[in-house]
Amino acid sequence: MEDFYRELIIERYKTPHFRGELEPNDITFEDDNPACGDHIRIDVRVDENQVVTEAVFSGEGCAISLASADLLLESIIGKSIDVVKELTKEDILDMLGIELGPVRLKCALLSLKVLKSGVYGIGKTDSTE
Amino acid sequence: MAAKTTTGLDVQQVRKDFPVLSREVRPGVPLIYLDSAATSQKPEAVLQAMNTYYRENNANIHRGIHTLAEEATHVYETARKKIVGFIHAPSVEQLIFTRNTTEAINLVAFSWGRHNLSAGDHILLTEMEHHSNLVPWQLLAAEMDLVLDFIPVTPEGILELDEYQKLLNCNPKLLALTHMSNVLGTINPLKEILQDAKSVGAVTLVDGAQSVPHLPVNVADLEADFYAFSAHKMCGPTGIGALYGRKDLLEKMPPFLGGGEMIKRVELRSFKANDLPHKFEAGTPAIAEAVGFGAAVDYLLDLGMDKIENHERLLTKYAMEKLQEIPDLTVLGPPAEKKGGVIAFYLKNIHPHDVAQILDSVGVAIRAGHHCAQPLHTKYNLPATSRASMYLYNTLDEVDRLIDGIQKVKDIFR
């Protein structure tokens, strides 16, 4: 069970590398996990080729949700939005390196949910242009 | 620290009555159950009573002529009598079986509320209510254009009674409040509060979900107009609760749900409602659960509610002392003497989910979240808290295990 809180997770929770807000930004989205009150906002900037140049998160949450947000954003810098759209639950679990029960899985996946909502949101804007 | 306390309750003997308490959460890690405010564990006597009912008496109640139907009706109505006695209600007609506290409050909101309130009327609530005593009134207020007022809670976690007096000037038609907060643990000075509401002509409803399991409650002495509670928090099964109501109010109220059992006679386009309490019990009720509810009441009475209350007071005092010694830990709510065995706390810079997860790794079951009292957490500017809640089967040793577990949390997040 201590594996659950392995050093990487505690370290990223206490000193996140990608915490903050970006104004202006190209993609922004926020959402809650109603079960626990966790709240995450993600801001992303992309270049003209739709490649992520900057990504940060803000909000409140447990170690699992905030560490996974930090690791997720680290993984998307330099990736195209199309690649971001393909990210899955397994990618997050691989980054965290732990197995999670159904309740904590929601904590771990909140940032992915927020990121994907934002990414698909911008897709919709593009299609209307 | 010895597990036996000096409160007259033989806790080790009590623990033997609860089969689940002997299990391990995982090999070598015994269960320390500190989540009884969410739901209590069930003693063998309750499990046996329900088992026996299904094995020997199972039938649908009322109107059946055969032996089993008569027996099932008898055990169902006997359970009602036991619960009536437990809360000192004046008569069996005044005790309605519901699904839980939430349904009991909804019954009052939609049966009494819709027929006694009109646009612009005020309903007085408190800031410490949990969602089941907030949302039904929000629904009714939206439907009928009512005004909701709230008695504020002090930073210490008690009701601001001076503000209450001012709010009574709005002439509320109803005061609905909790007897004991499920987050702060605060036990409200109910008798005085209800008297004052009565003096301005307000009808009163008490949410007793957290009080009936833990304190001797006398609804006649309190003079509450409505009093709602659930079986599952007081050693009984889930799926059944009760509403006590003042007889003249209940008699004038229209049925809440329609169906079988709540009628005397039905024609194609009309019906005549049944007498109390059946008027409010539409459809086949939770018969086995009623039997279990009755057995739970027998069990608690046999031990003695005053002894149970004293035992929990001792546990609460001890836990509060130990928790307050921990640096960076803050306990919500009033001091031990003003509260029941519900202790919500937060650790600086550590999310309650992480606290609960690490405590689970040492077998300690607590709750993390907003405990269905989100507005109260918003008031204290906390997204969530951890909550340890105690009952008759908990020991001082278990409190020590909680404290050790919290130390482990702090070590991991150091």
Image: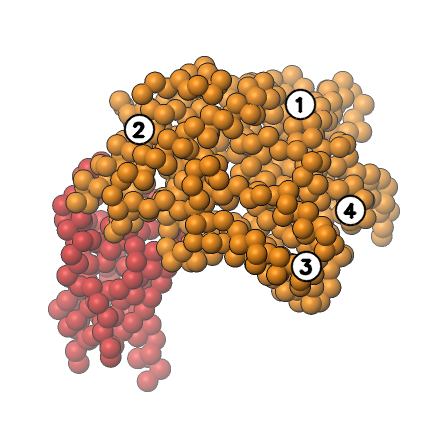
Mark nearer the N terminus (3 vs 2): 3
Q: Which residue sits at x=61%, y=43%?
A: B190
Chain to which the residue tagged by mark 2 belongs? B
Which of the image's four quarters has the N terminus of chain A? top left
One can see residue A42 in this view: yes
Which amino acid lies under the numbered mark 1 shown in the image of this protein? Asn
Query: Separation of disc 3 and disc 4 at Cα?
Result: 17 Å
Residue B172 image label: 3
The chain in red: A
Which residue type does callout 3 highlight?
Pro
The disc labelled 4 sits on which kind of residue? Leu
Q: Of tags 3 and 4, which is closer to the observer? A: 3
Read off the residue under disc 1. B58
Residue A105 image offset from top left, x and y in percent: 31, 48
Residue position marked by numbered label 4 in the rendering: B249
Q: Does label 1 lie on the same chain as label 4?
A: yes
